[in-house]
Image (tube, coloured by chain):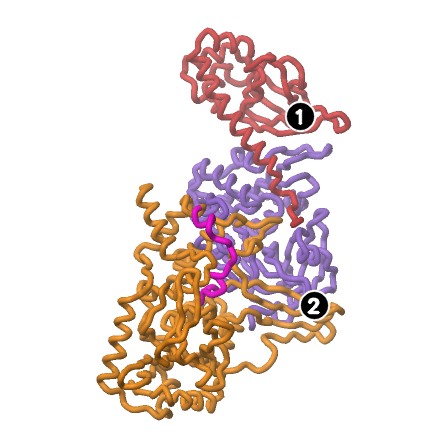
Amino acid sequence: MAAVLQAGELSELFRALHSRDYTVVGPTVRDGAIVVAELSTAEELPFGWGVETEAGTYRVRRRDDSAAFGHSAGPQSWKTVLHPPRARLWSADRTTGEVTTGEPGPRPRYALLGVRPCDVRAIGILDRVLSAGRHADPVYAGRRDGALVIAVECTEPGATCFCSSMGCGPGVESGFDLAMTELVDSEGHRFLVRAATPAGREILESLPTTPADDTTATRAADAVAGAARSMGRTMRTPGLPQLLSDSRESPHWDDVASRCLTCGNCTMVCPTCFCTSTEDVTDLTGDHAERWRRWESCYDLDFSYLHGGAVRTSGPSRYRQWITHKLGTWHDQFGESGCVGCGRCIVWCPVGIDITQEVDALATLREETS
Amino acid sequence: MNVAVPVPYRVTHRREDTDDTVTLTLERPQTPLPRFAPGQFAMLTSYGVGEVPISLAGSAPDGGLVHTLRAVGAVTRALHAVRPGQVVGVRGPFGTGWDVPSAAGRDLVVVAGGIGLAPLRPVVLAALAERSRYGRVAVLVGARTPSDLLYIDELSTWDTIDGVRVDVTVDRPDAAWSGHVGVVTTLIDAATFDPHKSVAFVCGPEVMMRFVAEALVGRGMPAHDVRVSLERNMHCGTAWCGHCQLGPLLVCRDGPVVGYDVAGPLMRVREL
Amino acid sequence: MTAGPADRVAVHPFLAGLTAEQRDALAADAAPASFSSGQRLFASGSAAEVFWLLESGSAALDLPVPGRGDVVVETLTGATVLGWSWLHPPYRWHFGAVAREPCVGLVFDASSVRGRCAADPAFGYAVLNLFTPVIIQRLQATRLRMLDLYAPRTAP
């Protein structure tokens, strides 16, 4: 079921979400970037804002139209909401013997507005890692269950995007409640909206939409198809896990390490990086203990600490760990690739290391040595 | 049950094994955790200090847990100092076990280095509990010095059992030591087992396990019949934190017990 | 009590790499040997005029350290070879050896074997090829011990 919602009526979407007690989270311009934040009104969306991106470069810019979702590769992803940077796992009181689990305060139900297809896939990947294993993460489940996913298809890929190569964009077929495709042209500024779930359908039916006309439907499909053909990067995916496994002793790691700062930016902005560390803390009396969990990066020197030292101390070994896990061993561990082609790691790397180029280099080296 | 939250277990017994190693007996609580199999591990919490992975060293008669641990860091030092009556937190069981029953009808070769004897103790106890199911049992133990040996009385008792042979060696003897001196691999040549019909259970420092596994394979054992117990940094035990990776393996989920056919190639890669 | 040296030489696993002819030549320099528990085979510093093939039993290699007495550095269990200081000058034992339990084996006249090696290079090469793998193996085991893997390692 597809319908058309005028851009001016996005406030109705907000009304529908708020009246159903959703906390709306979506993109907004703040501090020179398009970030993910709680939104109270549709006006907070980044209408007319776009981005200029390349390896190691990100600038917001004014668009010459009023598109609200004409941007890519922001520094945050939806893991900021679903798999937060800090979470309390439990607290225990020695005097009363009481143990409280989970995070303090009421848990909101999130409506994630503006999830790009790469990020829809990323959420699915996090689902696989954190909920679908032998043990389900209660922090993730508490935020993911009941969350409404409103996807927005891409019509204008960023310079570092390669979701096409990873098979998860620029259109989206599943993993959402509502999907929107934005069009700004002679017919006006509007969204083609589809619902895929009962929750999505119920909301869509409450909005002041008009039935999807052929022109809009065709233009939306064409725009997405056009985006698929104009990706900024390509990742050579066939045999990628084998390539990385074959490259464990490749001389290329020293080459990357001569550029890589092991700063861990890539792990912070990547929508699927999920590693965390736990910390136990007490109050001064020692009677009250808490365990907190926070994001951690495999680039951190202590990440692989074992018996007085880390297993992976060198730069090459840590870069190798990150890329091999993301593109290779993720398959062994979780049955799919960990990469969604969002290109954030390329944009947000201070020295502009490009994961697609590194894969090409490894492939070339392997051919030369075989 | 929230698997991220430790269950309080009361310590009922504390035994000092060496100057830095203790064995704690934890009493079965009202709502105990699921049964631990040999080779699996618990995440033990010293409340307010932190949590570490410690393998099962045995089961208490009441269904409680027995853990042997060595004080090497803040958390293990705190656990080492715990006294009977105090409470520690336990999560688990986690990981793959030694799967002793799968070795039925075969000779068992148990090779322990240092504190690696603790996770292997349940293997020997399981085999002795159903002695007729298994062939010969060779227990090869290496320790740094005679005063670092664990479970000395049990080792002597096991050696008296029909078809069980315990050999002990130390890296450095003291004046009173009259036993073997040398690294534990030197005990393998003299051990009695049929390499084509055995299962080896190996636990100790990673380099020791590699050399032992290579020596066993050199004796003719297929690599997949040699089981090693891997160790990596762990923050969760539930495959959420990402720390315990060794190449494609998540050691808390795909290990810690892994066949040497899988572990060997990974152990040989520097800084993997 | 047992077979003669020639027969025992023929079956000792350590000598499997020799031809039958070479084994017979070696057997000519061999005599039965046995030690009771605690008996010293040789003392460090003394002349290395013999070497042994231990068939059964075990021996401890030791070194006298002032203030610590005779410190055991390694124990060897039969069947194995004991002693290679006879191979090269100054032909003196670097360590000592004591039987830890009753040992039975063969003792070889080192200077006679050396004479044969000099006269017949093929024989000499074959004998060296028997010893070098054992030396390498024991060196590797010693290096492994030097890593002191069981030592506690804590963060600084």
The amino acid pointed to by label 2 is Thr
Give the position of the N terminus of chain B as an image quadrant: bottom right
Residue A211 located left or right of residue A149? left
Residue that badge 2 annotates:
A282
- How far apart are the alpha carbons under marks 2 and 1? 54 Å
Looking at the rendered structure, the kind of residue marked 1 is Asp
Q: Are marks 2 and 1 on the same chain?
A: no
Q: Is residue A23 magenta?
A: no
Q: Quadrant of residue C16?
A: top left
* Front one among C132 and A166: A166
Among the chains pictured, the one given red colouring is C
Q: Which chain carries label 2?
A: A
Q: Nearer the viewer, residue B261 or C5?
A: B261
Q: How crowded is mark 1: few (under 14 residues within 10 Å), some or many (20 or more)?
A: many
Q: Is residue A369 left or right of residue C78?
A: left
As rendered, which of B155 and A219 lies closer to the eye? Answer: A219
Q: The orange chain is which one?
A: A
Closer to viewer: mark 2 or mark 1: 2
Report the span colored magenta.
A255-273
Locate residue B67, reporting x and y percent. 64, 56
Q: What element carries label 2?
A: strand
Q: What element carries label 1?
A: strand
Residue B49 in sight: yes
Colour assignment, chain B = purple
Read off the chain for label 1.
C
Q: Where is residue B114 in the image (x, y as percent from the top left)?
A: 62, 44
Question: What residue is pinned by disc 1?
Answer: C62
